[in-house]
Image (cartoon, grey):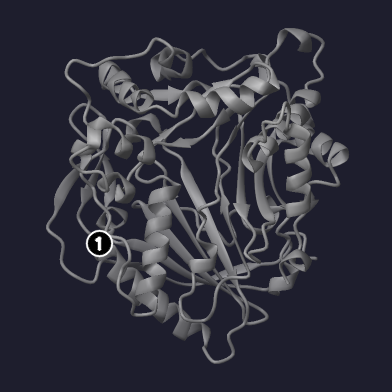
Amino acid sequence: MARGVFKVTMSKQEVVAAALPLQEHWLPLSNLDLLLPPVDVGIFFCYKNKQSMSFGSMVGVLKKAMAQALVTFYAFAGEVVPNSVGEPEILCNNRGVDFAEAFADVELKELNLYDPDESIEGKLVPNKKHGVLAVQATELKCGGIVVACTFDHRIADAYSTNMFLVSWAEMAQSKSLTIQPTFRRSLLNPRRPGHIDPSLNNMYVPVTALPPPSKGSTTDDHDHLISRIYYVTSEQLENLQDLATSNGCKRTKLESFCAFLWKMVAKSETSNDRAQKLCKMGIVVDGRTRLSEGHYQNDHPTLMATYFGNVLSIPFGGEKVEDLTEKPLNWVAEEEHFLGLIDWVEAHRPVPGLAKIYGSGSDEGPAFVVSSGQRFPASKMDFGWGSPVFGSYHFPWGGNAGYVMPMPSPVGNGDWIVYMHMLKGQVELIEKEAADVLKPLTFDYLS
């Protein structure tokens, strides 16, 4: 297995713009977009050697389809610029997407998927320098190909990006688009007058109210965040469900997995005052269904299903495991939570807001966020040379808290792929205590 020692050589870089001229215009960010810090998210897909197509031919298909998809998803072809009060907006000017071609001196089966910090970061997933989206296609020594992209999270959440990725693949196969995105920001306008539940002040904070960085930060080798990818079988997920079930109330697989992780992360806290600290867990919740079902959207019940942008919230708790597996998910089941969050941002503009848990962790006690990637469309990412043998998000997000995303295995058998970005000490304890649940990912699980 290659341990990050292979070389990647860039052979060509160009900008791919939308295939049709676009009228230059400004697209404001919604209040929910404004809750995101300026962080980039990576995605990559691995394909086996397609002997009937050369790398150059595949790149040609990718670029042509990209240009066609950008006509509909034009926000990805723009730039993020500050407006008169310093808030970010999208200048939809069709600057295009930076598209890089590369060669990696490694075979697909040798990629160390378990340790993306070595094999993926800065090598196969592009570092976005300009625009909203960057793409890299990398030819491997065996003739396989890795297609990866990096996008600005302020512009799109995973749901929106998944819509684009599927449309990109559909264009490559000359299919009609199954989704037409809507950029109608009025769907997320604040209310007049606004109504803010006081509990939102416990979840979100203006950046001007954030505490200064701790001066006594440690250089402990266990105190830095690392990324790992694991494989979890459906049998282990069912076992976790059985363990989490009480009084006849069966938890979902996600709830059960979250409870399991919470126990592991809490166990990793070894400071002398651990009894005074809380272990916080947040759940990323998509608000599209909640908003489309409520009276707020009764005139346009289907528009939220195709809304392009961020419609996320991160409720979190630091109580008993029962609270962490129930309260965050149940509390945000109401439309009012998201409407109040929109109003909260409006009340603090132009000062940016941030989810408190993003900056949690370290001195305050361990903290991590779980984002379900069960809609990750790996099986639909066929550009004409078959579906990928593997695909994953790659999101070392820059916060103090950990980040975890479980995704369906591309094998389609109910198993999971789990991306983790957590403290090294937490990872080491989890691997020691739960080796039967979380297996380091290798291609043997994907064949």
Q: Nearer the viewer, residue 49 or 341?
A: 341
Which residue is depicted at the point 78% across and 48% down? Answer: 236
> Tag 1, which secondary structure?
helix
Q: Residues within 10 Å of mark 1 (few under 14, many from 20)?
A: some
Q: Is residue 288 left or right of residue 183?
A: right
The residue that label 1 is drawn on is 72
Query: Residue shown at 67%/49% (left/top)?
Result: 418
Residue 192: where, in percent of width, then height? 16, 19
Quadrant position of residue 85: top left
Tell me which corner region of the image, top left, top right, bottom left or bottom right, holds residue 21. Answer: bottom left
Q: Position of residue 86 (x, y in %)?
A: 25, 29
Residue 378: x and y in percent read 54, 63
Q: Give, as a three-letter code, the residue at label 1.
A: Thr
Question: Which quarter of the rendered picture does the C terminus lie within?
Answer: bottom right
Q: Tell me residue 49's x, y (percent).
A: 62, 82
Name the outermost residue toward the front: 248
**Residue 63 visible in the current orientation:** yes
Viewer-proximal residue, 314 or 208? 314
Location of residue 195 with respect to 6 vertically, above or below: above
Residue shown at the point (25%, 67%) measured from the top left? 18
Based on the displayed image, in which of its 4 quarters is residue 155 positioned?
A: top left
Quarter holding the N terminus is bottom right
* Above/below status of 254 relative to 118: above
